[in-house]
Image: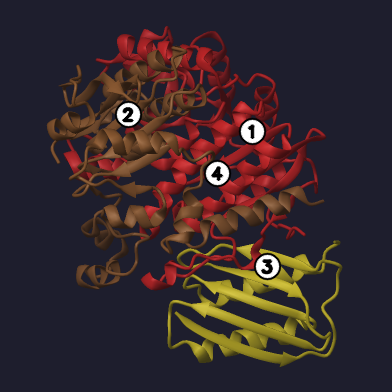
Chain colours: A yellow, B brown, C red
C-alpha cells in the first residue's frame, strides 16, 4: 500500500451545508472518496491510500486539477483507491464535492 | 483421541451412542442426568439429510423438561458441496440445525460442543460453533480455510502465507487459532477423565455469548468486541 | 451523523449499500452508526496488500420504515464481495445486540455477501455464529429480523446460514441464496456436477424464484427498492416467534421437502411437483406474472 498526502490552499470554502460525504466503493478500477468539512476554509488536505505504487505524479496532477475546479476549501479528503483510472478519480471527486454542496 | 476413546472417557458406565452414515447419535449418563449425544464422525461432510436428522434429535431433547445437556462431538468435513444439497436449500437445513441447538440451550439444555478431529465452513457453524460452550480435544484440527485455497484466491505465494500464518491467528488453520478467536473456550486434558471435565464446564457456563471478549483477552481477535460495543453504544444514544 | 448518498439507482441489484438503505427507509430517516468517518477499517487486509474501506463494507444504523423505528444493516457486495471480516461482522453483531435491548419494530438485514472473508477466515467464521446467535436473541425478544436478498453477491456461505436464521426473507429474482457457490461446487466435484458458467443453472438452483417457490424465502420482490420496501412492511407483522413450535414446524417443513423433492434432478422437476403449470417457463416469467404464480402455488413458508 502506498500512502500519498497533498495539501492545497484554496481561494474559498466549499459551498453547501453538508459536513460529510462518502461516495464510491473500493473495488477494482474504482475508489471511495470521503469528504469531511473539518479544516480552515482556505485549506484542503488530501490523503490517498493506493495499492498501485509509482503513480505519484498522476495523482498530484489530478488532485491539483480538482482543487482548481472545485475550490474545496475547508474539506479533508480521504481516498481509498482500488486502482481507478484518473478520469474515474476526477469524476468521483466532483460527485463527492457536489454532494457536500447539497443541503444538510 | 478416537471417538471410542472419547465416549469411554465421557461415559465410563456405558452408553448407547452409535455412528451411522457418519452421524453420531445416542445418549449416556452424565452429571446426574442423561446427556443426549449428537455429532459427526470420520470427517463426514454435512448435507441436507444429515443436518435434518441431527436437528430432529436435538429438538426431541429440547422438548423434554429434564434439563439434560446435549453434547455435540465433531470430526467433520465441510458442508456437502453438491448440486442436490443446494437445490434443496442447504442453507436452511444447516441454519435449522444451528437454531435447534440454540433453542435447546434456551430451554435449559446446556449445549457443549467438542471438536476432536476436523471441521470446516458450514458444517462447523451449524454444529460445534452453535453450542454454548465449545471445547477442543488435543489434536483436533478445525480448518476454516486451508492455506492452499487462500493462496489461490489471494494470489499470494503459499510460502508467504505460511510465514504470515505463524503469528496471524485470524486466518491460519488449527485449534490454537480458534482458541485465540475465543470460539474454542478451552482445550481438554486428554489424560484426565472427560466426564469430570465436561461436568466442570456445565457448572460454569457462560451466561451470554462472550466469545468476542475471549478473543480480545487472548489477543487473537482484538477488534470484534470493541466494534460491537461501539455500535451498541451508538444505538443507545439519540 | 450520516453521510449523504448520491446515485439512487432504480435497480436494487445495481445500487450501493447506502443507496439501498436510503431508498428502502423513510426519506432521510437513516442515521449511521460508526460510519466511514470513524475509520474503523480492517486491521488484517494490509497484511495481504489489499485496500481497505472506511466502513469495512457494511453500513449499520437506525431509521424508520413507515414511521416505525427499525435498525438496519446493508452489505456492500462490491467491496471484497461483501464478505464477513472481523470489523464488518462485528458491526452487525453490535446492531443485533442493540436490537435485543432496544426492541425496535424490526431489524432489516440487506444481504450482499459471498460469505466469510478468507483473509480473516477464523474471525469471520466465528462471527457468523455470533451473528446467528444474536439473531436468535433478537427474535426471542419478540423483534422480527427480516432479511432482504437481491444484491450482486447474493447471500452465500455463512451469509446463507445467517439468512436461514432470519424470521422472514424477501428475495428478488437476482437474489441468490446458497451455502456453496457455483465455483466451489465445480472446484470440488467437477463441471459435470455443476457448471458454474451456466448462468441459467445458477439462477434456477440458487436464485430468488426457486427459493420463493420452495419456501427458502417468504416473499418475492421486483428488483426495486419500492418492491423490497413493500415486501418488508408486509412481512414484519407476520414474523414467527422463535420457539419449539416454530422449530418443530420447520423440521416438518424441511422433512416434507426432502421427502417430496429429495430425488429431483433439477429445479423445474420440483416446480412441477409443486403444481406449477409449464414449469419450464418459470425462468422467463416477468415479476408480476411470477408473483401471481407464487400466490397460487409454491410451498408453505410459515416456519422459519
Chain at tag 1: C
Residue C37: assigned label: 3
State the mark number for residue B198. Answer: none
**Residue A87 appears at what percent x and percent y?**
57, 75
Question: Dividing the picture into quarters, in which one does residue C274 lie?
Answer: top left
Cα gap from disc 3 to disc 2, whole angstroms: 45 Å
- Residue highlighted by disc 2: B71
- Say if C244 sits above or below C25 in the image: above
Between the C-alphas of marks 4 and 1, the distance is 11 Å
Residue drawn at x 27%, y 16% is C264
The quadrant where residue A97 appears: bottom right
Is the same chain shared between marks 3 and 2? no
Tell me where residue B160 appears, x and y as whole percent. Answer: 25, 73
Measure the alpha-carbon separation of dots 2 and 1: 41 Å
Residue in the foreground of this view, choosing between A101 and B124: B124
- Residue on which disc 1 sits: C228
Amino acid at each position: 500500500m502506498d500512502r500519498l498526502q497533498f495539501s492545497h490552499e484554496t481561494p474559498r470554502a466549499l459551498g453547501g451545508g453538508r459536513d460529510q460525504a462518502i461516495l464510491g466503493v473500493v473495488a477494482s478500477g474504482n475508489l471511495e472518496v470521503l469528504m469531511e468539512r473539518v479544516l480552515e476554509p482556505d485549506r484542503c488536505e488530501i490523503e490517498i491510500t493506493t495499492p498501485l505504487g509509482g503513480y505519484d505524479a498522476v495523482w498530484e496532477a489530478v488532485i491539483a486539477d480538482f482543487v482548481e475546479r472545485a475550490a474545496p476549501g475547508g474539506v479533508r479528503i480521504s481516498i481509498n483507491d482500488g486502482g481507478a483510472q484518473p478520469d474515474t478519480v476526477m469524476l468521483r471527486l466532483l460527485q463527492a464535492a457536489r454532494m457536500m454542496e447539497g443541503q444538510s | 483421541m478416537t471417538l471410542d476413546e472419547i465416549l469411554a472417557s465421557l461415559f465410563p458406565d456405558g452408553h448407547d451412542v452409535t455412528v451411522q452414515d457418519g452421524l453420531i447419535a445416542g445418549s449416556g449418563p452424565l452429571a446426574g442426568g442423561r446427556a443426549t449425544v449428537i455429532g459427526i464422525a470420520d470427517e463426514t461432510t454435512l448435507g441436507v439429510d444429515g443436518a435434518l436428522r441431527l436437528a430432529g434429535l436435538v429438538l426431541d431433547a429440547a422438548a423434554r423438561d429434564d434439563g439434560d445437556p446435549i453434547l455435540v462431538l465433531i470430526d467433520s468435513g465441510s458442508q456437502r458441496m453438491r448440486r442436490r444439497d443446494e437445490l434443496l436449500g442447504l442453507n436452511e437445513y444447516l441454519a435449522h440445525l444451528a437454531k435447534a441447538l440454540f433453542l435447546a440451550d434456551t430451554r435449559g439444555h446446556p449445549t457443549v460442543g467438542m471438536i476432536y478431529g476436523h471441521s470446516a465452513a458450514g458444517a462447523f457453524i451449524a454444529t460445534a460453533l452453535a453450542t454454548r460452550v465449545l471445547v477442543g480435544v488435543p489434536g483436533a484440527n478445525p480448518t476454516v480455510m486451508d492455506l492452499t485455497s487462500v493462496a489461490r484466491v489471494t494470489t499470494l505465494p503459499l510460502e508467504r502465507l505460511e510465514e504470515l500464518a505463524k503469528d496471524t491467528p485470524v486466518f491460519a488453520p488449527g485449534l490454537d487459532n480458534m482458541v485465540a478467536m475465543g470460539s474454542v473456550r478451552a482445550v481438554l486434558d486428554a489424560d484426565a477423565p472427560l466426564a469430570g471435565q465436561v461436568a466442570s464446564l456445565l457448572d460454569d457456563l457462560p451466561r451470554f455469548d462472550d466469545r468476542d471478549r475471549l478473543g480480545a483477552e487472548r489477543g487473537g481477535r482484538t477488534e470484534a468486541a470493541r466494534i460491537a460495543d461501539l455500535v451498541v453504544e451508538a444505538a443507545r444514544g439519540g | 451523523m450520516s453521510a449523504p448518498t448520491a446515485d439512487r439507482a432504480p435497480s436494487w441489484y445495481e445500487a450501493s449499500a447506502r443507496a439501498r438503505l436510503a431508498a428502502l427507509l423513510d426519506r432521510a430517516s437513516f442515521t449511521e452508526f460508526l460510519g466511514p468517518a470513524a475509520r474503523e477499517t480492517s486491521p488484517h487486509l494490509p497484511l495481504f496488500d489489499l485496500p481497505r474501506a472506511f466502513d469495512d463494507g457494511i453500513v449499520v444504523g437506525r431509521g424508520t420504515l413507515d414511521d416505525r423505528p427499525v435498525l438496519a444493516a446493508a452489505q456492500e457486495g462490491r467491496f471484497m464481495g461483501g464478505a464477513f471480516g472481523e470489523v464488518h461482522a462485528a458491526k452487525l453483531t453490535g446492531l443485533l445486540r442493540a436490537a435485543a435491548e432496544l426492541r425496535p419494530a424490526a431489524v432489516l438485514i440487506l444481504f450482499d455477501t459471498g460469505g466469510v472473508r478468507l483473509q480473516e477466515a477464523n474471525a469471520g467464521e466465528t462471527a457468523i455464529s455470533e451473528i446467528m446467535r444474536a439473531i436468535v436473541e433478537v427474535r426471542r425478544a419478540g423483534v422480527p429480523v427480516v432479511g432482504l436478498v437481491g444484491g450482486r453477491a447474493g447471500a452465500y456461505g455463512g451469509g446463507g446460514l445467517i439468512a436461514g436464521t432470519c424470521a422472514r426473507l424477501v428475495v428478488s429474482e437476482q437474489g441468490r441464496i446458497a451455502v456453496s457457490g457455483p465455483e466451489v461446487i465445480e472446484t470440488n466435484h467437477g463441471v459435470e456436477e455443476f457448471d458454474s458458467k451456466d448462468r441459467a443453472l445458477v439462477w434456477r438452483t440458487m436464485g430468488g424464484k426457486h427459493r420463493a417457490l420452495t419456501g427458502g424465502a417468504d416473499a418475492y420482490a421486483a428488483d426495486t427498492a419500492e418492491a423490497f420496501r413493500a415486501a418488508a412492511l408486509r412481512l414484519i407483522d407476520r414474523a414467527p416467534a422463535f420457539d419449539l413450535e416454530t422449530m418443530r414446524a420447520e423440521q416438518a417443513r424441511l422433512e416434507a421437502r426432502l421427502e417430496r423433492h429429495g430425488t429431483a434432478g433439477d429445479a423445474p422437476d420440483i416446480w412441477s411437483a409443486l403444481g406449477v403449470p409449464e414449469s419450464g417457463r418459470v425462468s422467463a416469467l416477468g415479476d408480476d406474472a411470477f408473483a401471481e404464480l407464487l400466490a397460487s402455488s409454491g410451498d408453505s413458508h410459515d416456519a422459519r
